[in-house]
Amino acid sequence: MRGRMKSILLPLLVYMISVFVFNEFLIYYVIISSCDWPHLKTTKENDTPLRTMVLADPHLLGEQYGHWFDKLRREWQMYRSYQTALQLLNPDVVFILGDLTDEGKWASSEQWNRYVHRVGEVFFTPKKIRLHVVVGNHDVGFHYDITQSKLNRFLISFQSKNVQVLNIQDNVFVLVNSMGLEEDDCNMCADVESRLQYVSRSLKCSQNKDAESDECATLPQYPPYKPILLQHFPLYRSSDALCQGEDASSGKEYEKYKEKWDVVSRDASTRILHMLRPRLALSGHTHNPCTYYHGDGTLEITIPSFSWRNRNDPSFLLLMTTPNDHAVSHCYMPTEGTVLCIYVIFIAVVFFKIYWVTRH
């Protein structure tokens, strides 16, 4: 019997290595290779579509509450998913919609520096691809808990701003710190309000070809197209029961969202939609997908968490844009359930093989 056991050790070892390599490396290529960029309905001859990859809520675990194995497992999943997506899909720009960190709001200066280093490793991005990050509540805290030092270190570390306008191939993106939309005149909120007013006037002047006022002459000029809004909190909606398309509720009951906690307040949402008049809004925070049309017709897409820790089926958004058009598609990563199932089957086969050899 000992001789028969030795005869199966090498095949079992090869089998084990094969399963491990597939589960921890190859499966990402298999799953993500099925994703493709969406097709635009109308593309002018001179338009070069911009390929944008958008993800949200990675929640890299911290040193206080994050177990080492949990950190290793989740970060490897995100690292492999992200690097595989960059390799296979080759986006022009990547946006991460907040909550890069899970414990950034509690981290000391030393812990924060280690966090920034880990973000650079997990989300390593070649220089040819532009990476932009939006601040989230886990990065700096909810409105009541934010200090200027915590906010500044995030903005400096990730070269971000409370309100930032990007012009990429004549596509205008407006990135907003949604924790600053409380409208209570705090320093951060006052800065966000002031910057939004400035951006709003600039966009209106840029979009109005007949604008020749003295004020317009002093403001930055952007391409005369509607912007795309990106922020961490979704704009106001009462719950996910009103999600449409693939994200429709299907009769499921949803908890009511709390303003300024789960979503931006109703008043602030109305103001930002009126000020920016975006053609599309993208958000995160809830960890769940949602396609929602606001009262003025603005489409908002809430992107689910990028981490297995928050979802069994994490995904990210693929956005194809020209100045006048856009199209979206979701790209799903391997589910944690699938990976665990493969490991369970492997273990069962090994035990069955050992049992068979020892009994015959």
Image (cartoon, grey):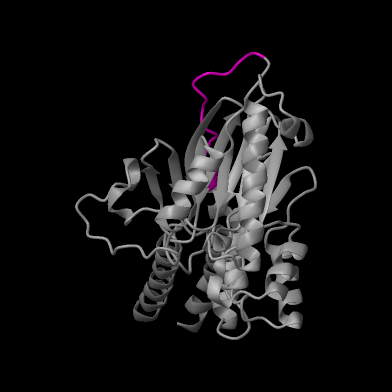
Residue 58: x and y in percent read 56, 63
From this viewpoint, which residue is outermost toward the left? Answer: 251
Residue beneath the point at 49% across and 48% down: 271
Residue beneath the point at 62% across and 58% down: 80
Which quadrant of the figure has residue 322? top right
* Direction from residue 41 to residue 198 in the image, left or right: right
* Direction from residue 237 to residue 98 in the image, left or right: right
Quarter of the image with the C terminus in it = bottom left
Residue 82: x and y in percent read 62, 54
From this viewpoint, which residue is outermost toward the front? Answer: 214
Residue beneath the point at 54% across and 59% down: 181
Residue 15: x and y in percent read 53, 64
From this viewpoint, which residue is outermost toward the bottom? Answer: 64
* Direction from residue 165 to residue 58 in the image, left or right: left
Between 335 and 148, the one nearer to me in the picture: 148
Quarter of the image with the N terminus in it = bottom left
Residue 36 seen in the current view: yes
Between 333 and 40, the one nearer to me in the picture: 40
Magenta region: 32-45
Which quadrant of the figure has residue 33? top right
Q: Main secondary structure of the magenta part?
A: loop
Q: Is residue 146 magenta?
A: no
Position of residue 274 relative to residue 102, above or below, is: above
Position of residue 326 relative to residue 91, above or below, is: above
Q: Is residue 43 magenta?
A: yes
* Direction from residue 306 to residue 139 in the image, left or right: right
Between 174 and 3, the one nearer to me in the picture: 174
Between 184 and 311, the one nearer to me in the picture: 184
Residue 142 seen in the current view: no
Position of residue 41 relative to residue 351, above or below, is: above
